[in-house]
Amino acid sequence: MQTTRRQFLTTAASFIISHGLIGSDALGQKKSTRVVLLGTKGGPRVGEAGRINPSTLILINDVPYLVDCGYGVTKQLVTTGVALNRLRYIFITHHHSDHNLEFGPLLYNTWITGLPAHIDAYGPPGLAKMSEHFFNYLKFDIDTRIVDEGRTDPRKLVTTHEIKPGVVLVNDDVKVSARLVPHPPIKEAYAYRFDAKDRSVVISGDTAYAPELAEFAKGADVLVHEVMYLPGIEALIKRLPNAKRLREHLMVAHTLPEDVGKIAAQAGVKTLVLTHFVPGDDASITDEQWSEGVRKHFKGEVIVGKDLMEI
């Protein structure tokens, strides 16, 4: 049978895509939305139990959207294969150090690649000052490198947007919305929702049990939610001198597995991803222990997150 030119081109294109020789977008097709857990450990301590401090990467049409900048985020982005000069959008949920400690260094590391792109950063009030103070902290180094190495000024690399609840970003690929969540004593802690053309993803940020978050996440495909395991907390406080005060904070500021399950069920999400584990440095807590309470209320897919896991 004679092969037409149209059939030949279609077959050839299918062969090239299936063998990874070009991306699917080479034929004008949009790339699917991907979620990568860069860091899944709650709290500011580092280097224990194999988890990095919190950050989540969402790739929408191959454009990186980064939620939070916990310590180690630069390394995790590079490990994931996302070149730093591709970074366009950063979202900070709140101003605890495990969520913003590497915000400034990440901007610097992006600049020092020599091929920086403009970055829009979104977060609660204080974000602009944090950016300004970081660049002042490294003013000598920055000014020296501008002269000696012919670099552009990194202070022009980033535009900060101090957000309020509601829609914070709309472009051709996604609408990003923010909602306040309870995380005392911090008054402005946010969850983010990313509505792309093929998938909706909600990132809870740090939050206590919040039925209003379930409404915000209504119908989303993926809910990435923090979780706190109470027996692990009880074991933790036995080892710490500030145990009583720390326990009081954790109990009013984070979400137990049973309540995470309730939120996911109320929201009707398809997939629930657990992250920001508290305590995040207790390797004795099993995946089943993290998820057991969740499954009492949520019957959909439950994923116990790991660093560098792609959803």
Image: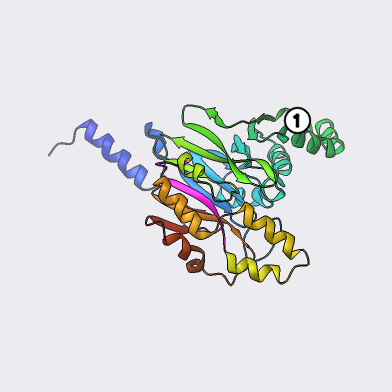
**In the image: residue 83, left or right of residue 148:** left
Residue drawn 58% across the image and 65% down it = 230
| Figure quadrant of residue 42 | bottom right
Is 165 on the left-hand or right-hand side of 258? right
Question: Which residue ends up furthest to the left in the rendered image?
Answer: 1
Q: Which residue is mark 1?
A: 155
| Residue pictured at 50% horizontal, 27% vertical | 171
Does the magenta portion include 227? yes
Compared to residue 206, the image places residue 257 above or below, namely below
Residue 226 within the segment the image draws in magenta = yes
Q: Nearer the viewer, residue 290 or 182?
A: 182
Amino acid on which disc 1 is placed: Arg
Question: What residue span does the magenta drawing correspond to?
Answer: 217-229
Residue 1 higher or lower than 72, as above or below: above
Front residue of 193 and 260: 260
Could you tell me residue 285's position as x and y percent? 56, 69
Q: Quadrant of the N terminus?
A: top left
Residue 191 rendering spot, x and y as whole percentages: 56, 41
Q: Position of residue 301 (x, y in %)?
A: 39, 56
